Image: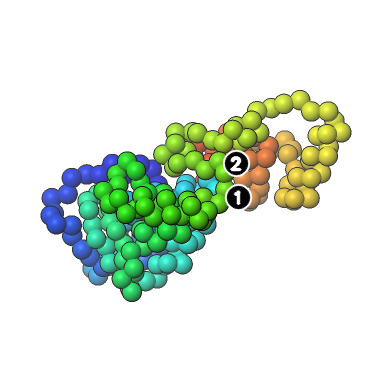
Amino acid sequence: MAASTVAASENSPAAEHTCRVVGIKDGDTFTCLTNGRRQITVRMAQIDAPEKGQPFGQKAKSTLSEYIYGQTVRLEESGFDRYGRTLAEVYDESGQNINMLMVQAGMAWAYKEYMTNTAYQEMQDEATRENLGLWSENGYIYPSDWRRGVRPRREQVATLPTAEPHQQRSGRLAQDRNARGFTCGSKRFCREMNSCAEAMFYLRQCGVRRLDGDNDGVPCESIC
């Protein structure tokens, strides 16, 4: 979901195609097969969904999957981004604009850097007032800021090593063990992790930042 610098399109007005959705990458990106059986990656225009490591990142992905996975959708294309992905507004089989639905559900932001339709901002404002989706929690961070490494203050503090009295530390570890099934131990590398859940625990609860080499909030991407 990295920033989508729009390449100028030679087609005017916007081209329209249909394709069948075969994969969901995250809350604003998916893959589909065209009528010619060519697989393309689509980056939904006008919106920016939470990154995978952000709160509601996985929920946004599953919501998009519920909306369009396995469907034949119509793409109203507006060009390509710098990664070669097709930029498009997406319509499902009943004609609903899925980009707008994601914003209305609080599962994506209006993409302020590249937004050309102010209706998206109005929908975001409404979702914010209704405390829907990502707007139901405090401390949300705009995805482009997250990609630059901005994190909630409480998370930044949690990653700093601090001295604790033995009794306090033992109590915290016992609580972690009961809540997660893991404890902060001596593991430091992805090769030592037995699951994505364990890797996430070591990153978020134990502060082992080396597990997130690209600083996108997702550790050990070979297993996550």
Is there a contact, CB below 8 Å, between mark 2 and mark 1?
Answer: no
Residue visible at 45% across and 64% down in the picture? 65
The residues tagged by marks 2 and 1 sit, at their Cα atoms, a distance apart of 9 Å
Which residue does the numbered mark 2 point to in the structure image? 190
Q: Is residue 200 left or right of residue 127?
A: right
Most foreground residue, 26 or 182: 26
Q: Is residue 110 left or right of residue 116?
A: right
Amino acid type at image mark 2:
Cys
Is 39 situated above or below 186?
A: below
Most foreground residue, 37 or 120: 120
Q: Is residue 55 left or right of residue 145?
A: right
Most foreground residue, 142 or 184: 142
Q: How far across and down, in percent of the image, does residue 101 sit?
A: 40, 61
Most foreground residue, 201 or 221: 201
Q: Dividing the picture into quarters, in which one does residue 103 lie?
A: bottom left
Mark 1: give few (<14), some (14-19) or many (20+) Cα within 10 Å: some
Disc 2, SS: helix
Residue 41 visible in rendering: no
Residue visible at 36% across and 62% down in the picture? 98
Amino acid type at image mark 1:
Cys
Mark 2: give few (<14), some (14-19) or many (20+) Cα within 10 Å: many
Which residue does the numbered mark 1 point to in the structure image? 196
Residue 201 visible in rendering: yes
Q: How far across and down, in percent of the image, does residue 26 sit?
A: 44, 54
Foreground: disc 2 or disc 1: 1
Residue visible at 40% across and 71% down in the picture? 70
Disc 1, SS: helix
